[in-house]
Amino acid sequence: MLSKPILSACLASLIGLAVPQAALAHGDAAPQAVDTTGLPDLPEEMASENPWREADGDLMMTAVEIGAKGFNSNCARCHGLEAISGGLAPDLRYLEADSWGDEWYLDRVLNGYEQNGAVKMPPFADILSQEAIWAIRTYVETRPDDQELAERQDELHALKERIDGLKTDASGAIDVAGALTELGESFVALSGAPRSVTALEEAAWLLRAEPPRVNAASDALLGILRD
């Protein structure tokens, strides 16, 4: 992982190149509010560190799900779908999941970024609630290594087949969910966060619902499968 001084310099320099080209390519870049229904309310005072970094179960999955929606509507046009940067803006998956990374993230999100009088990133302080800000942070910092996902396609396809088998008989949903969780836990987050959250965990979460959401779980894996 990059050292903090090196990463800081990279982020600061790259972010100044990001918005003009990306905004023109992807249309309206106006900040959008994020619906955080399902997340617990946070205190009025802004936290200095991600309050959901150590979350588990439904809270973690809800934070990631809402954070993904917030990221895609406000950040992906510059920082890339699935937070995988195309090179114009920083790859935020590498922003350390610690107090230093949180401080940098909050400064940019709340205050935006200007270079030579030009707005390169708009401020979100009056747009995003604290819950939305930290949900997006949770989503970004739990991103796995997409290259590792690409290298383990045989395992992913095998589990997709097991999920599809549940469409005719869902009695084994809990066992398949366990296998999904076990494989998902083997991927590390590029940020150094305590855990990554992949489509495997999302699928497992859906299979543990009552009744199991088999079709949704099958669809969840499509985004990480390659032909």
Image (cartoon, helix red, strand yellow):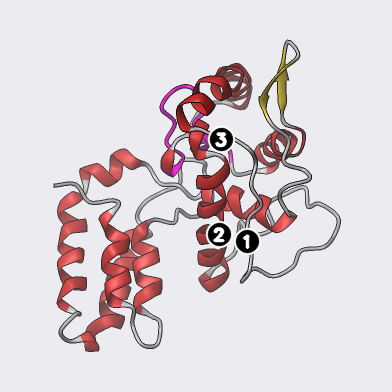
Position of 144 with respect to 89 (left or right) is left
Q: Which residue is mark 1?
A: 35
Q: Residue furthest top?
A: 116
Query: Mark 3 or 2 closer to N-term?
Result: 3
Q: Secondary structure at mark 1?
A: loop
Say whether marks 2 and 1 touch (CB < 8 Å): yes
Residue 208 picture location, percent across and down: 38, 80
The answer to which quarter of the image holds residue 96 is top right
Vertical position of residue 132 compared to residue 94: above or below? below
Q: Secondary structure at mark 3?
A: loop
Crowd rating for badge 3 (residues with CA inside 10 Å; few <14, some 14–19, many 20+)? few
Which amino acid is tagged 2?
Ile
Q: Position of residue 194 (x, y in %)?
A: 53, 53
The first of marks 3 and 1 along the sequence is 3
Residue 71: x %, y % from top left: 54, 46
The numbered disc on residue 66 is: 2
Regarding residue 194, the answer to whether it shows in the image is no
Q: Is the residue marked by circle 2 packed among few (<14), some (14-19), or many (20+) residues within 10 Å?
A: many
Q: Nearer the viewer, residue 95 or 39?
A: 39
Is 93 within the magenta? yes
- Kindly indicate the quadrant of the structure image that contains residue 60: bottom right
Mark 2 or mark 1: whose residue is earlier in sequence: 1
- Alpha-carbon distance for marks 3 and 1? 19 Å
Residue at 77%, 33% in the rendered image: 111
